[in-house]
Image (spheres, grey):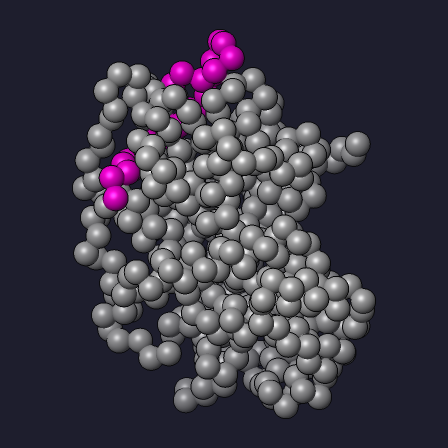
Amino acid sequence: MTLSRRHLIGGAAALPTLASVPVRARAGSGWDVIVVGAGVFGAWTAWTLQRRGEKVLLVDAWGAAHARSSSGGETRLIRTEYAGNALYTRWAWESLAEWQALSKRHESPIFHDVGALYIYGQDSAKIDASIALQRGLGIPIEKLGAADLTRRWPQMNFDGIAVGILQPTMGALMARRSVQTLVREFVAAGGSFRPFAVDPPHATGAALAAITGNGGETLRADRFVFACGPWLPRLFPEVVGSRIVPTRQDVFFFAPAPGDDRFEGSKQPAWVDASDIDLHYGFPDIEYRGFKIALDRHGPRFDPDGADRVVTEEALAKVRAYLARRFPDLARRPLAESRVCQYENSDNGHLLIDRHPGWANAWIAGGGSGHGFKHGPAVGRYLADRVLGTGTPEPAFTLAQHQPHGETQ
């Protein structure tokens, strides 16, 4: 895909800028719903509720998909290879259509269909079961042997790899851009957004009447959704606590050699090395940012507010060592860019989406655990259903199924 300068500077400028959005409160008690947190879960939830006729206020302390959020940064992988988990496979497939529709509605691309490649050290019946599940849902998928992998992507070294699973219709979501575009669309359709730093909420009865923040200001609503990612443990220390643990995750972008197009999206898919203990993954050179590589293995515990976001020399050395083994022509190339983000890990990798145990009108949503971003549209629908009293709860998402880290049932 060739991008014009108009694409690169962002085609969503015709939508309202978030800084100039007027806040329109409902007469009486306040809003129908206040959604706290303008990351991917909060944005899709607010967007969905607004389209169902609710008066919705979306707030965030720093802005939609800001640099410290789990929804910030450049790219997120969307794939339906989920080791046979039917719920996440279906949710990712359904969400892809919503992401594609959002991308088509705006000139600035949200989704790049570079494909997604999983590589495994051993073939297994579990891999075949996952393929069968995806084919049953109509998802295009290919199973490739080592010789086929080497023939199709000679820029990769497939030593030690037995099989690859290619999902040709999957690819890269532009993380920050997609969430900010969605929030602008939400506002243009009648929703409201404002900066607001929420204090830990308190209530004396069975319902939450209001939230406070910004030095004592009060906002009232009938219902509340808290989609605050790694800040959920601070807002709800007793309810969430260590059920969600933020971890530091280093991300690197390497510059291919001048004129070397082998690592562009037309010739290199996004990839996940499931044979590797650190579960390295990466993206081709998308929108000229460089070849992205990171690892899915959880890093050390991380303070999303106070820690400096500078990658370490040790982490850079380790990722170069991996490149030397799997992408040898990139191992000595210059580091073009780096960033430190965080995962918000639940104890078992499942999302945490449940009603607050003490307040019937308040919901908590988080625990993306590094794989949640792609599910944003499905999470928005699920949460909207639960907030509005429709749909059925997913047991795996409940507080009861999430133990504080370090504890077992």
Residue 19 x, y percent position in the rendering: 22, 42
Q: Quadrant of the C terminus?
A: top right
Residue 216 x, y percent position in the rendering: 32, 18
Closer to the camera, 386 or 122?
386
24 vs 274, left or right, is left
365 vs 286, left or right, is right
Residue 360 x, y percent position in the rendering: 51, 20
Look at the image and give the residue range highlighted in magenta: 189-210
Residue in the picture at 31% in, 31% down: 55
| Magenta span contains residue 190 | yes
Q: Compared to 313, does 377 lie above or below?
A: above
Residue 194 x, y percent position in the rendering: 28, 35
Answer whether residue 39 is visible to the viewer in this image: no
Image quadrant assignment for residue 138? bottom right
| Magenta span contains residue 230 | no
Answer whether residue 223 is visible to the viewer in this image: yes
Residue in the picture at 52% in, 79% down: 268
